[in-house]
Amino acid sequence: HLEGNIALTIRLARMTGATICPWYNVRRSDGFRFDAYALPPFKLPAEAKPGERLVEDIKLLNAVIEPVVLAHLDQWYFLDNALPS
């Protein structure tokens, strides 16, 4: 999704040269507390021309995040911005 949150994260990291530091929270069984987890930070690979790696970068970040989402699917909510308003 070229306009979603992952694409936005990639664009911001590219514009600023920022390191991406993925983290997430998992709700505890009591339903009121959360455990926070940080994944290893990473920099995006170099690109010769601005924007040429957007799709590859999205796939890269998605590969980091997707296993977390799948492991805790009941705790994720997604609403695509392509839905009619």
Image (cartoon, rainbow, N blue to C red):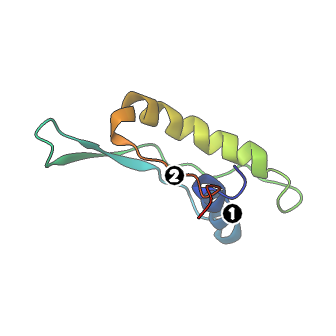
Q: Residue at x 54, y 55 (%)?
A: 20
At a point 56% along the width and 58% down the height, the residue shown is: 19
Q: Residue furthest left?
A: 30
Residue 2: percent from the left, percent from the top?
73, 54
**Residue at which label 1 appears:** 11
Residue 9, percent from left and from top:
60, 59
Q: Nearer the viewer, residue 19 or 9?
A: 9
Q: Please say if 67 is above or below 11.
A: above
Tell me: residue 74, above or below residue 77. Answer: above
* Mark 2 vs 1, N-terminal side: 1
Q: Residues within 10 Å of mark 1 (few under 14, many from 20)?
A: some
Which kind of residue does numbered mark 1 sit on?
Answer: Arg
Where does label 2 land, which residue? 79
Q: Measuring 15% from the left and 43% from the top, which residue is drawn there?
A: 31
Secondary structure of the residue carrying tag 2 is loop
User: Which of the labelled discs sits on residue 59, or is there none?
Assistant: none
Q: x%, y% of residue 76?
A: 39, 43
**Label 2 crowd bin: few (<14), some (14–19), many (20+), radius 10 Å:** few
Q: CA distance from mark 2 to mark 1?
A: 21 Å
Q: Is residue 17 left or right of residue 75?
A: right
User: Helix, strand or loop at disc 1?
Assistant: helix
- Residue type at mark 2 is Leu
